[in-house]
């Protein structure tokens, strides 16, 4: 009655005035969402082709996830780990049953998990676990454990994690975040010979783990050459090194398999989960490994934890999210829709585009268009035409819609992408 609702402009102004500028968002405000669609306060509709960086696999506000959230919210939400709760155990058992078969456990020691909230925390957990395992089980001399990582990795934002990033300008912020944690070696991605070379240079007896993304997401959907992960598995087994697969972005059907390592039938010793595990409504992550690596001989009371990790609300949602991914066969769906999307994008790329396209690549519904030049204007034009996507490393646009996207919706997206790229 006579008062004006705030507009998109007002919300953006508030963000810029009161929030640290640690992101450079596309100028769009989302006030409502459902499935693959999001809406701004003015009522304009957009197709979400980012899915909160692959967290919205099930589509926004999935009714069963929201029902679980509401139901559990009325029962018990947070107890801390000072006490047991009725949801965490069943959730951890589900991780053992569902994720366990994807983990290398030659001695059948059993599968155990450490639940946390964000992807970064799953990675931080992994680093502590493999260092402790290295000293306790592998007998690495005190404070000499090394972890090998890959160039162009993205594993999160803590000081330790950014310290082993090779993205000097953005992630390491020109060294303004130093001094960094020692103990990491960076090698090129996608070349197993480099891994073995680094292990031999360091001394195999000092290497605790190799941390790798099976497909590098933030780097711009970089898919390693065929056979890479298989060879990596052999090398890690040969030198008794923990192979950690960071599936925070690639896990839960995104690439057309339940986990991206499956494309090469590879079982890592440890899998890191996040993003889509939370069903798009709640931050839930986990470090899943064998009892030998993460069991009571390595992780003892007080050595790691968080107030929110394993809380009943997270556990209930995590279980529901896994259930839906499996029940609705989302891996198969991601493969089918992804293959179609990629094929049609390749057809578009044959035409003369405004900005030359360098390459189109992808697996399942994790797709990238790499341009020869800065692609920010394309992203903004896509937004103006009703498609939300985001550039990474300025020249690459990632397309990762919810896995529930239909063929008709992909056709609509393609129509707009073609219009923007060609006109
Ligand atoms: C592979 C990978 N690991 C870890 C992370 C960090 O996850 P979060 O942002 O939930 O902390 C990301 C985020 O993009 C990621 O892609």
Image (cartoon, rainbow, N blue to C red):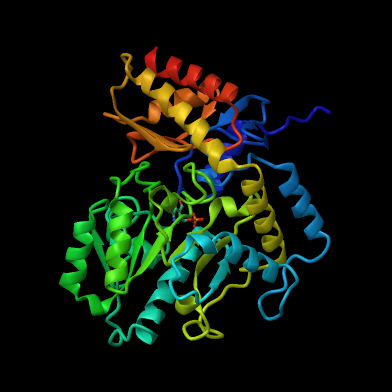
In front: 156, or 294?
Answer: 294
Residue 40 image position (x, y, % from top left): 64, 30
> Which residue is pictured at 53% across the width and 46% down the height?
253
Q: Is residue 265 above or below residue 90?
A: above
Query: Residue 37's image quarter?
Result: top right
Q: Where does the C terminus fall, quadrant-wise?
A: top left
Query: Residue 56's image quarter?
Result: top right
> Which residue is pictured at 67% across the width and 36% down the height?
33
Q: Is residue 180 visible?
A: no
Q: Is residue 239 visible?
A: yes
Q: Where does the N terminus fall, quadrant-wise?
A: top right
Residue 315 image position (x, y, % from top left): 68, 63
Total marks placed: 0
Q: Is residue 203 above or below residue 407?
A: below
Q: Is residue 255 above or below residue 78?
A: above
Query: Residue 192's image quarter?
Result: bottom left
Residue 97 image position (x, y, % from top left): 60, 63
In front: 393, or 269?
Answer: 269
Outermost front residue: 107
Left/right placement of residue 80 relative to residue 336 reads right
> Which residue is pictured at 71% across the width and 62% down the height?
313
Residue 339 image position (x, y, % from top left): 45, 30
Left/right placement of residue 35 relative to residue 295 reads right
């Amino acid at each position: 009655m006579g008062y004006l609702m705030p507009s998109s402009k007002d919300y953006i102004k508030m963000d810029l005035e009161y929030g640290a500028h640690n992101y450079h968002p596309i100028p769009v405000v989302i006030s409502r969402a459902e499935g693959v669609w999001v809406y701004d306060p003015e009522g304009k509709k957009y197709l979400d082709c980012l899915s909160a960086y692959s967290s919205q696999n099930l589509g926004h506000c999935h009714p069963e996830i929201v029902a679980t959230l509401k139901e559990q919210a009325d029962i018990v939400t947070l107890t801390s780990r000072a006490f047991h709760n009725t949801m965490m155990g069943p959730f951890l058992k589900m991780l053992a049953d569902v994720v366990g078969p994807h983990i290398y456990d030659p001695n059948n020691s059993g599968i155990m998990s450490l639940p946390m909230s964000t992807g970064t925390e799953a990675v931080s957990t992994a680093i502590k676990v493999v260092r402790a395992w290295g000293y306790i089980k592998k007998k690495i001399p005190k404070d000499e454990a090394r972890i090998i990582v890959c160039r162009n990795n993205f594993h999160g934002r803590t000081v330790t994690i950014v310290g082993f990033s090779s993205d000097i300008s953005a992630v390491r912020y020109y060294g303004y975040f130093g001094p960094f944690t020692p103990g990491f070696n960076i090698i090129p991605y996608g070349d197993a010979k480099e891994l073995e070379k680094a292990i031999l240079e360091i001394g195999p007896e000092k290497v605790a783990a190799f941390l790798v993304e099976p497909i590098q997401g933030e780097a711009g959907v970089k898919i390693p050459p065929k056979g890479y992960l298989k060879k990596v598995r052999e090398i890690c087994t040969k030198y008794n090194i923990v192979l950690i697969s960071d599936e925070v972005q690639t896990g839960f059907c995104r690439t057309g398999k339940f986990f991206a390592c499956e494309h090469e039938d590879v079982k890592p010793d440890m899998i890191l989960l996040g993003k889509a595990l939370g069903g798009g409504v709640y931050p839930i992550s986990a470090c899943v490994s064998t009892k030998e690596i993460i069991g009571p001989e390595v992780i003892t009371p007080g050595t790691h934890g968080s107030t929110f990790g394993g809380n009943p609300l997270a556990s209930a949602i995590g279980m529901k999210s896994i259930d839906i991914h499996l029940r609705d066969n989302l891996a198969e769906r991601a493969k089918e829709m992804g293959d179609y999307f990629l094929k049609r994008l390749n057809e578009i790329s044959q035409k003369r585009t405004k900005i030359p396209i360098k390459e189109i690549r992808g697996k399942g519904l994790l797709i990238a268009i790499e341009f020869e030049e800065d692609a920010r204007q394309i992203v903004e034009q896509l937004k103006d035409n009703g498609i939300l996507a985001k550039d990474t490393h300025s020249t690459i646009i990632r397309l990762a819609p919810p896995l529930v996207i239909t063929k008709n919706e992909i056709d609509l997206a393609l129509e707009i992408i073609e219009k923007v790229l060609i006109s």
